[in-house]
Image (cartoon, rainbow, N blue to C red):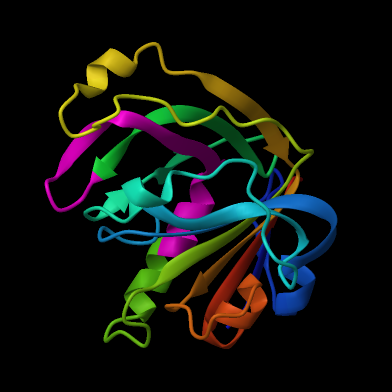
């Protein structure tokens, strides 16, 4: 199932749309794949992210976390916080900030920085995502994820920083945390997908056969 949502002063028009048209683009975009336990419309850990001009192209990341750190425990170094508003002039409003990384096994933040994306969407998007959650019961996807495309110009990311032993420090000592990018999008796509399969270099290769629905949101 593929959905298209265009928000104007009147209720959105929802119609069928080709997946490639929603996720393929000739403009540079920030792509991410995120998931959580509370439902599609709530906070998520980001499992994959990077820049590409098309979801069929490999993602490029401007910064990487230390491999030895990410190999320890169940570390979440990037998170997505979804917000909703009754009036959003663009299709989406994004703010990226430093945030402490999180050890899911210990259920604790650590003294080392990752990133947090706060994404403000129209409240009707939450209604659609919640409806998709209900339609997935009983689940046709074991672990539904959100694959998101946000067209944007490139921008710089801060290098990760913190205690040499992040587990022995205090996350509060990372303050002040830096907000390093803000941008609006007039045309975004959110795809509900299952767990990745294969090890291809692009999101299309890993998730292309697991797409359950696509929501495309355009500014009115």
Instruction: Please state which of residues 135 and 55 is positioned toward the viewer in this rendering.
Output: 55
Instruction: Please state which of residues 156 and 210 is positioned toward the viewer in this rendering.
Output: 156
State which quadrant residue 149 falls in: bottom right
Name the quadrant of the C terminus.
Answer: top right
The x, y position of residue 112, in whole percent, is 33, 30
Please tell me whether residue 128 belongs to the stretch shown in magenta.
yes
In the visual, does 99 lie left or right of 107?
A: right
Instruction: Please state which of residues 35 and 11 is positioned toward the viewer in this rendering.
Output: 35
Q: Is residue 172 above or below residue 47?
A: above
User: Which residue is at a point 35% across and 24% down the rendered structure image?
Assistant: 162
Q: Residue furthest left?
A: 106
In the visual, does 92 lie left or right of 186?
A: left
Count the labels in the image.
0
Residue 11 seen anywhere in this rendered image of the structure: no
Q: Is residue 198 above or below residue 219?
A: below
Residue 167 seen anywhere in this rendered image of the structure: yes
User: Which residue is at a point 28% across and 82% down the rendered structure image?
Assistant: 137
Q: Residue furthest right?
A: 26
State which quadrant residue 91 falls in: top right
The x, y position of residue 61, in whole percent, is 63, 49
Please tell me whether residue 197 belongs to the stretch shown in magenta.
no
Instruction: Please state which of residues 35 and 17 is positioned toward the viewer in this rendering.
Output: 35
The x, y position of residue 50, in whole percent, is 62, 52
User: Which residue is at a point 79% across and 38% down the rendered structure image?
Assistant: 153
Name the quadrant of the N terminus.
Answer: bottom right
The x, y position of residue 21, in whole percent, is 79, 72
In the visual, does 57 lie left or right of 71?
A: right
Instruction: Point out the stretch of residues depicted in magenta.
Output: 103-129
User: Which residue is at a point 33% across and 17% down the rendered structure image?
Assistant: 174
């Amino acid at each position: 199932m593929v959905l298209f949502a265009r928000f104007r002063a009147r209720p959105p028009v929802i119609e069928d749309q080709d997946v490639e048209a929603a996720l393929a683009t000739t403009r540079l975009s920030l792509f991410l794949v995120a998931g959580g336990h509370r439902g599609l419309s709530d906070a998520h850990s980001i499992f994959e992210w990077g820049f590409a001009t098309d979801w069929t192209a490999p993602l490029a990341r401007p910064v990487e976390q230390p491999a030895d750190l990410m190999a320890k425990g169940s570390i979440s170094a990037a998170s997505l916080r979804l917000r909703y508003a009754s009036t959003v002039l663009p299709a989406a409003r994004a703010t990226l900030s430093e945030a402490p990384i999180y050890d899911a096994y210990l259920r604790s933040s650590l003294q080392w920085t990752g990133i947090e994306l706060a994404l403000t969407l129209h409240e009707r998007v939450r209604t659609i995502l919640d409806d998709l959650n209900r339609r997935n019961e009983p689940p046709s996807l074991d672990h539904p994820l959100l694959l998101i495309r946000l067209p944007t110009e490139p921008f710089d990311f801060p290098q990760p920083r913190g205690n040499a032993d992040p587990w022995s420090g205090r996350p509060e000592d990372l303050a002040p945390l830096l907000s390093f990018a803000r941008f609006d999008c007039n045309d975004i796509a959110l795809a509900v997908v299952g767990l990745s399969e294969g090890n291809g270099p692009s999101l299309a290769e890993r998730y292309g056969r697991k797409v359950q629905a696509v929501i495309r949101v355009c500014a009115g």
